[in-house]
Amino acid sequence: MMNKPDSDFLVIGGGIAGMLFAIKAADVGTVTVLTKAASDEANTAYAQGGIASVWSVDDSFESHVEDTLRAGAGLCNRDAVETIVRDGPDAVRELIALGTRFTRVEEGGEDEYDLGREGGHSHRRVLHAQDLTGREIMRALGEAARLRPNIRVLENHVAVNLLVERGTDGQPGACWGAYALEAGGHAVTKLIARTTMLATGGAGKVYLYTTNPDIASGDGVAMAYRAGVPVANMEFYQFHPTCLYHPDAKSFLISEALRGEGAILRLPDGTPFMKRYHPDAELAPRDVVARAIDSEMKRLGLDCVYLDISHREPGYVRERFPNIFKRCLSYGLDLTRGPIPVVPAAHYMCGGIVTDLGARTAIPRLHAAGEVAMTGLHGANRLASNSLLEAAVMARRAFAGAREQLKENTGAPPEFPEWDPGQAIRSEQRVLITHSWEEIRRLMWNYVGIVRSSLRLERALRRIQLLKEEIHSYYWEHLIDSDLIELRNLVTVAELIVRCAMARKESRGLHYNLDHPDRDDAKWPYDTMLKAGDSHPTPSAGRPA
Ligand SMILES: Cc1cc2nc3c(=O)[nH]c(=O)nc-3n(C[C@H](O)[C@H](O)[C@H](O)COP(=O)(O)OP(=O)(O)OC[C@H]3O[C@@H](n4cnc5c(N)ncnc54)[C@H](O)[C@@H]3O)c2cc1C
């Protein structure tokens, strides 16, 4: 009997990129969506600020392109920027058509979408649903997916490895799905599909402090890298400048839309300090703000700094930021009455799996979109609210190509072996996992954080390589579970970040090395690209600065 795929499309990840792709793919085939936790637990659900797109008549594509290129510090791929910016309004219209309710206002007697302004944007162009934009997008996409019988969502299923054909020379051929583990158990199943979409989001959990939820452990990057797909620019990790600093608040982000609406960063004695770092003060790009806070905290030995919007009218603050207002109040902090304590935290992975503008990776029939992918849009630094934009646009573009592929790919899949646990035994020493986990995250925070040095990076690499050896032998000797899968991926991502950071002997965008404090356009107008088996990242000449 002919070997048959389980579905036409396997989508690994149910955030904006995965869900939007799945909804579109369901028009032409059967779709399986894997989500590692509950289907609404994704970075997307936490997005507060909104989605950037040229919307008002006063705005222009040229202006959005220029703002994006400026933020990207000479490393954006202009083609990617222009394409994604120009596709933005259609992608937003599709989100609206699928049921997303962005906030509207009365403007000169007209009922319009309210457009927010954020740091680095020269126009108001951020559509938002109050300050719960991501939740609203997830609600709309979740409901749209449920209406499509062709979509099967497998919650609490962790993709482990990609199923990739190998040629006789060992080189990767086409991708045919993935091995997946049902969380809470040890059984691994094969999920065969004609087209695979990696939409696993970011890797904030590689750092001690992060705004990301627990699902963000870089699984997609690690899986693709192991399969032989090049990844790039992993040194550019964006730290959000303002995460609430409170012992009970886990990763609660204070949107930069607050600074867009006039909030001021202050030292404990009330002194504002951002003007000393950048002429745009609080509206400077994120990396500048995060480094300024980091530098003030280190200079004065502070645990945090303060963000103050109490000079704005209280009713306005409550209405514009209802979620942030309520959450802060639940910790006894009233935004309308005084400053709140904030610290920077790992937020967004600008690098990732290298894709073209059809979301195609180097492996045939393996696509990647959203935070996991590196299209060239962000360069060395992401402009606020450009990530939801990129994820939505690239999911749509991926579908356009995948639909054509599906018509051509009608043959039987090859035989892939069942998952073989070998002599693996049940893990009895959880402490080995939890300790390694904490060690990686602390090490990355201290040595590979907002400000780096060559010595710290060398030390980090030595420790990570040792941890990697230990984790890998533990992985093969024990029955796998979701914690062990994440740990293996996390150490891979940590190594990729460090190796890319070591290769870049300059400071640019989000990467700041005290030993190479200047930008070097003569030597480093390149991406740092790494493929499994490479001893060093290669500057990718394919992308002119
Ligand atoms: C607090 C916060 C605020 C933000 N605010 C904004 C904003 O205002 N504007 C903006 O543009 N961007 C914002 N971002 C960034 C933006 O939300 C993300 O970049 C974007 O949502 C990523 O979408 P995604 O679809 O790529 O991944 P995600 O939404 O993270 O989804 C990842 C999915 O992959 C699944 N997954 C992961 N690993 C596996 C595995 N091994 N097996 C199976 N499933 C797996 C997860 O379960 C999840 O379903 C914010 C991010 C955070 C954390």
Image (tube, rainbow, N blue to C red):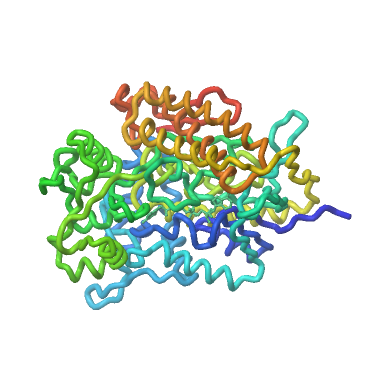
Question: Is the C terminus in the top left, top right, bottom left or bottom right quadrant?
Answer: top left
Instruction: Pick whichever, 250 or 361, lies toward us.
Output: 250
Q: Is residue 213 above or below residue 451?
A: below
Q: Residue furthest right?
A: 1
Which image quarter: residue 44?
Answer: bottom left
Instruction: Pick whichever, 203 or 136, lies toward us.
Output: 203
- Left or right of 463: which side holds 414? right
Task: Please indicate, yes or no, whether residue 120 appears anywhere in the rendered image.
Answer: no
Q: Residue at x 62, y 63 (%)?
A: 153
Instruction: Tell me residue 481's x, y (percent).
Output: 62, 47
Q: Residue furthest front?
A: 428
Task: Please indicate, yes or no, whether residue 204 appears anywhere in the rendered image.
Answer: yes
Q: Is residue 104 above or below residue 193?
A: below
Instruction: Tell me residue 342's x, y (percent).
Output: 25, 49
Q: Residue at x 57, y 57 (%)?
A: 35
Instruction: Tell me residue 324's x, y (percent).
Output: 29, 62
Q: Residue at x 57, y 38 (%)?
A: 488
Which image quarter: residue 70?
Answer: top left
Question: Is the N terminus in the top left, top right, bottom left or bottom right quadrant?
Answer: bottom right
Instruction: Tell me residue 465's x, y (percent).
Output: 52, 27
